[in-house]
Structure formats: C-alpha cells, structure tokens
Amino acid sequence: MFGTQWTKKKDAERITSDAWDALVSSVETAGDKARWMGRRTQHLADEASGRVGSVADEAGRRAQAAMAALAGHRPGKSWGWILGAAAAGLAAGWALTVGARRALTGSQFEDDLDLPEYQPDAGAATRSAAVRGI
C-alpha cells in the first residue's frame, strides 16, 4: 500500500512538474510574442502617426484658410513663384536678344577670326601693272 501511494505521489509530482514546465514555456513564448507584437505595433503606429500628422497639418492649414476666407481676409500672394517666373522671363529674353543680334550681324564666329579683308581694287591694280610690264 505504501508503494502505491509513493508511486501516485511521484506520478503527481512528475505531472505537476511537467505542467509547470509547459506553463513556464508557454509564458516565455507568449512574452516573446508579446514583445515582438509590441515592436511591430510601435512600428505601425509610428508609420500611421507620420501619415496622420501630415494629413492633420494639411487639414489645419485648410481650416485656417477657410476661417480667414470667412473673416474676409484675402490669401497672400506667392511671391516666390512670381519672382521665379520673372527670373525665367528675364533669362529667356536675354537669350533671345543675344541670339537675334548674332543672327542679324552674321555668324558668331566671324568676329573671332582675324581674316584679311578682301580688297578687289588692290588685286586689279597689281594685275594691270603686271600686264603692262612694270
């Protein structure tokens, strides 16, 4: 009788020990998964907050513009675009002016070459002197 109680007690302790080990393993695995999910959730939340933040900023700008319009205020001019367009117009006008001047005066390389000027009278005088035998 004593042997069967001893065996039952030993079996109960073994089962309890196995159950405890399984529980500890499950808790550790659940903790690892919870930490992983926490990191993943934090990453997703960071991405979402970035998107939501930019959308919220745009919504705030639009709401302020709407309130200003309802109050009768006119929006300011975008001087950056105006100055950029003026600078582009000046550059295009300068390029067209330089190109037109060069086209009207001849080739752009003509001024750079040091060619002797052609004088038709000087050649005729030399030929006529050669013909006369001078």
Image (cartoon, helix red, strand yellow):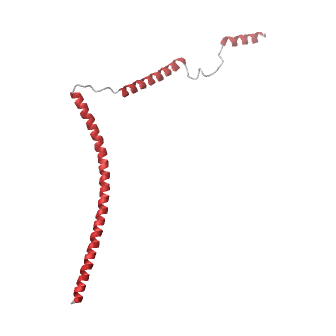
Residue situated in front as seen by the camera: 119 or 47 = 47
Can you say whether 27 is above or below 85 in the image? below
Residue situated in front as seen by the camera: 126 or 62 = 62
Q: What residue appears at the point 30 percent right and 57 percent down from the top-left corner?
A: 37
Q: Quadrant of the C terminus?
A: top right
Residue situated in front as seen by the camera: 133 or 52 = 52
Q: Quadrant of residue 41?
A: bottom left
Position of residue 17 measured from the top left corner of the image (x, y, whole percent): 27, 76
Can you say whether 54 is above or below 44 in the image? above
Q: What residue appears at the point 29 percent right and 69 percent down from the top-left corner?
A: 24
Can you say whether 82 is above or below 132 in the image? below
Q: How many marks?
A: 0
Q: Quadrant of residue 27?
A: bottom left
Position of residue 53 measured from the top left corner of the image (x, y, whole percent): 29, 42
Position of residue 113 measured from the top left corner of the image (x, y, whole percent): 62, 22
Position of residue 77 measured from the top left corner of the image (x, y, whole percent): 32, 26
Residue situated in front as seen by the camera: 57 or 120 = 57
Task: Give the side of residue 32 with respect to residue 123, left or right.
Answer: left
Q: What residue appears at the point 24 percent right and 89 percent down from the top-left corner?
A: 3
Q: Residue furthest bottom?
A: 1
Q: Residue furthest right?
A: 134
Q: What residue appears at the point 71 percent right and 10 percent down from the top-left corner?
A: 125
Q: Quadrant of residue 93?
A: top left
Q: Quadrant of the N terminus?
A: bottom left
Q: Residue furthest front?
A: 2
